[in-house]
Image: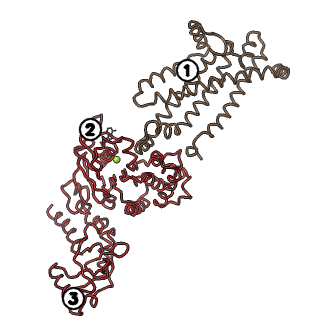
Chain colours: A brown, B red
Amino acid sequence: MVEAWQWVTKHPDKLAGWTLEHIWIVSVAIAIAVVLGVALGIYISRPGKEHIADSVLYLAEIMMTVPSLALFGLLMLILGTIGLKVIGFLPAVIALVIYGQLPILRNTYIAIREVDPAMIEAGKGMGMSERQLLFKVKLPLAVPIIMAGLRNAIVLLIGITAIAAIIGAGGLGVPIFRGLRNARMDLIIIGGVSVSILALVVDGLMGRVERWVTPRGLKRR
Amino acid sequence: MIRLDQVTKIYPDGTEAVNEVSLEVGEGELCVLLGPSGCGKTTTMKVINRIIPITKGKIYIDGTDTTKIDEDELRRNIGYAIQEIGLFPHMTVGQNIQVVPALKGWPKDKRSERAEELLELVGMNSAEFMNKYPSELSGGQRQRVGVARALGADPPILLMDEPFGAIDPITRVRLQDEFLKIEQEIKKTIIFVTHDIYEAIKMGDKIALMNEGRLVQYDTPSNLLFKPKNEFVEQFVGADRALKGLQLIRVKELMTGTPPLAKADERVVTVQARMEREGVDCLAVVDNEGKFLGWVDRVNVGKGETVRDIINRSVATATANAVLSEALSLMLSSGFKTLAIVDGINKLEGVLSFDAIQLALSEVAQRRGSE
Ligand SMILES: Nc1ncnc2c1ncn2[C@@H]1O[C@H](COP(=O)(O)OP(=O)(O)O)[C@@H](O)[C@H]1O
Ligand SMILES: [Mg+2]
């Protein structure tokens, strides 16, 4: 513990570098995952798409149970056979996007499907088209649940990104794996603690963002 | 205005919710769909704006087959207040009311002006409530906003499904009374769903009583009470229908709209002859603008030359929207067996005689006797 702290005071630039790298990877992955997850969630929530929704959600559940290490391995295999780089930033982001969009996709789907039927009927009855109904009624009402999914996803990705260091993506996983290889407890602690702190801080921040983007009328007083 | 022609709705699961219902609602009329729970009222209402597609039959609005009108366009021109109210919780009261005007592309200032006007119309202070959210309102206030929203873009037709359903009885009566006033101002064609016979009689110009998907009797409230078509109607309106009738039926249903009249400067002998010819004991006296002045009574004909000399001016009047019990108590307290029915500026709209009330009530008694 003490050694870890000493190391940090000696090399703050290195820790800062890993942390920024970590945040960068997570940000890129989350940005893509949100777009994909929300779009797919909206798509499978449309009436008449129930069977697709069932399969997609089932697939998503299974993917969530695949250990991230196994997924990285699988990805390296696939990327290798189609001739892409198997280590580094790209495969890491691809894996993270796959993971990250699951909670977002699931929450978007559930939120839209569970909008009070009375709201939908009122909207339709007043002459809203499907599109207007989606953007003026369903999505605004779904925002709190989608945001909860996003928050979930971000915390999840911060953890998994640490593991992505094993395929050379960089980030706070670097000291962890280096420590494991060289039996350097201090490095393992630095990486582990930093990841946890990062996750806690971002989770807290997301709580604020959540409240901020929730439509005022939906907030509990 | 609205015409249902042999409309049948069978849900995908086989439920026959509406069975060959034919119904015509005139312009400016308030038609109540009444009946026990599950009889098909809501379904009948919702096929009109095509929220529910029909299985068989046709629906016409102003003579146009509704399936020929674009669905969204049709709905934007039909005010819609659903049973659950369904205010959007993420929108302010003002935004909720402006939904249809916004869909129709009204400019912003016209929209907010309209929303203010409507809030005031339903008895809410616009400055206070415009920017509140539905979660900040009481049940009664939400109902009012629901009604205001349905009126948003000033649609000629209004569909209302138990609009005063989920509130306490006292607020409910107040909202009904207020809505009756509003209704006179806005003059819309209204389909109003309720399972409450009191509400139906009170609100309706016509009542369509349904049972098990079929239209049983489509009639005025007084006919429904006093001339029930069959046993089901009788049972549904209840054994105390004479009392209900007195409490709820409005004067306009039983009054004579074009009674024989007298003018103040007419000679008594002329007027006397008219009374004999018409077989009445008194005539309402009006001025040249049709305003009610008083009564000329047969017992007083010997006491003067012209009507002016013998006119009885000290008598009570009622409005066409008063209920029969009010009219009756006016008659009893004034000792006069005929009541002049006037509008807001004292113009004579008709007369209501004690006999007319008695006749209606005695029909009930006769039916009861023959049971
Ligand atoms: N979506 C639906 N699918 C199947 N049956 C329905 C549906 N909606 C209503 N029903 C049935 O149709 C009948 C009429 O319903 P409804 O019009 O809601 O009656 P009311 O408004 O008079 O209570 C009832 O038996 C009800 O159970
Ligand atoms: Mg109903």
x, y percent for residue B336 = 27, 81
x, y percent for residue B138 = 50, 54
Dot 3 surroundings within 10 Å: few (below 14), some, or many (20 or more)?
many
- Towards the viewer: A74 or B321: B321
x, y percent for residue B170 = 43, 61
- Towards the viewer: A158 or B70: B70
User: Which of the two labelled residues, at mark 3 and mark 2, occupies the earlier sequence position?
Assistant: 2
The amino acid beneath tag 3 is Val
Query: Is residue A76 rendered to the left or right of residue B72?
Result: right
Q: Is residue B74 above or below residue B263?
A: above
- Marks 1 and 2, Cα distance to the nearest angstrom? 46 Å
Residue holding disc 2: B55
Residue beneath the point at 28% across and 40% down: B54
Residue holding disc 3: B268
Q: Chain of mark 2?
A: B
- Marks 3 and 1, Cα distance to the nearest angstrom? 100 Å
Q: Is residue A73 above or below residue B210?
A: above
The amino acid beneath tag 2 is Thr
Residue beneath the point at 81% across and 21% down: A13
Element type where label 2 sits in the image: loop
- Towards the viewer: B278 or B61: B61
Q: Is mark 3 within 8 Å of ligand 1?
A: no
Q: Is residue B238 above or below residue A58?
A: below
